[in-house]
Image (cartoon, grey):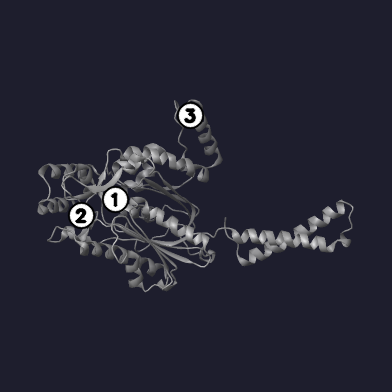
Amino acid sequence: MKPLSKLQLLQFAFATLLSVTLLIHYLLSFSHLVVSSHPVLSLSCAWCALVSVLYYLSTLPRPVLLLNYSCFKPDFHRKCTYEACEYFVRRSARFTPSSEDFMRGIYVKSGLGDETYAPPFIFQPDSEAKLESAMQEAKEGMFSAVDSLLSKTNIDPRVIDILVVTCGSFSPSPSLSSLLVNRYNLRPDVKTYNLSGMGCSSGVLSIDLAANVLRGCRKVRYALVVVTESISLNWYFGDNRSMLVTNCIFRVGCAAAILTNDPSLRRVAKMELAHSLRTHHGADNSSYRAAFQEEDEEGNTGVALTKDLIRVAGINLREHIKILAPRVLPLSQLASYAYSLLVSAVSRGEKKPGVPDFTTAFEHFCIHTGGKAVIEQVGRVLRLSEEVTEPARMSLHRFGNTSSSLVFYEMAYFEAKGRVKKNDRVWMLAFGTGFKVGSLVWRSLHDSSKESDNPWNECIHRYPLKAW
């Protein structure tokens, strides 16, 4: 619901008071009571109605607006070409020939292009990543994204009330949020949150967290959300094939966004958050173990992406959309979906429930770019055409799996193409370890415009292309 301005609220209150007063007078006259003999009763009822309406309006949740966002684009010399990857693997002398061949095959079939970005230690003489390498990776991404965001929004860091930082597998002390508080001289009373261990879904979940705080507290106005991941300390030097996959698909990326609950900023905001949903499926053991950080037989730490991951993603996505569908689908699609669920229940599972057409609810889809298989699985479950999954495939090709920030690179793709129009709805969908599924539904407040810091600016003319 679009919030009312102070003038509109005053006009609404006056109209309500007048309408209620006339209604009471009519009712009293109709019941053969003399209105003039009951002025106190009449006015008391009117004022009670007015107070009730004002109280209801005051308790409505405040809107959550996306002022803007920025995506980190590393320097040219950090590009991770096929040749750079192979050179690093051989120079490190940490893998068997069999493992090298396996990673070579995964890379070729992954859908990644030659312009993704790797962390600094890949290009340094010492192939062993240390804490310093991870801190350098984090600082480069976060500082670049936040600097760009503050510059184009003209927001003074001192007005930030909430800071949310998410990094799934790197949690130093002091925290990454403390690092940002120190660099940007944020206020002593700023509320900071650090999220970790939530995988690729944490970007969506961090926005959901910030939105809930903004909706529920009128004393805060601005929230800064920084979404990053660290590859440096999570590069796997072993021969477990389920863990070697991460070396082939994960790449450097970071995004930052500023949210506000101030309705007066609607005219300059980029989008409004219409819905958010997060579901956790960790009670199921196969879901919990689908992507798991552990040590291999030699004691090397890595994240194992099991063969069950794609199946788990499909099952949990179906459970997720059962909750999301009633909130976003038009009535015609809801009726059709409800009927298919009923038929499935009556047939005791012999007939599977149909999948609603989500293209009737959203104009644009930012789906999880976890890899070629994940994109294809989401496309199958939701019955999406290649045209709809184009941004995910192109983002995987250009930037790789940037983990929690991936949906923002897809959003930037839409904007670079000039496809987002006023009132368009955008669905961000991401999966995370545990197993979690997160959704954000945005409504565009303006037509998309070209921005100087869009990471696609220099290459958008080459896309789309045939990634696989």
Q: Which mark is residue 401?
A: 1
Q: Are marks 1 and 2 in contact (CB under 8 Å)?
A: no
Read off the residue under disc 3. 344
The answer to whether residue 269 is left or right of residue 80 is right
Residue at 11 percent across and 45 percent down: it is 96
- Which image quadrant for residue 191? bottom left
- Which image quadrant for residue 306? top left
Nearer to me, 255 or 421: 255
The answer to whether residue 451 is left or right of residue 425 is left
Relative image position of residue 292 (x, y in whole percent): 28, 46
Nearer to me, 139 or 359: 139
Relative image position of residue 37 (x, y in whole percent): 89, 61
Amino acid carrying label 1: it is: Asn
Label 3 or label 2, whichever lies nearer to me, is: 3
Residue at disc 3, secondary structure:
helix
The answer to whether residue 110 is left or right of residue 51 is left
> Are there few (<14), some (14-19), or many (20+) residues within 10 Å of tag 3?
some
Nearest to N terminus: mark 3 or mark 1: 3
Q: Which mark is residue 2?
A: none
Relative image position of residue 131 (x, y in whole percent): 21, 62
Nearest to N terminus: mark 1 or mark 2: 2
Residue at disc 2, secondary structure:
loop
Q: Calculate the distance from the C-alpha at mark 3 to the C-alpha at mark 1.
A: 36 Å
Read off the residue under disc 2. 80
Q: Is residue 354 visible?
A: yes
Q: Calculate the distance from the C-alpha at mark 1 to the C-alpha at mark 2.
A: 13 Å
Nearer to me, 447 or 376: 376
Residue at disc 1, secondary structure:
loop
Amino acid carrying label 3: it is: Ser
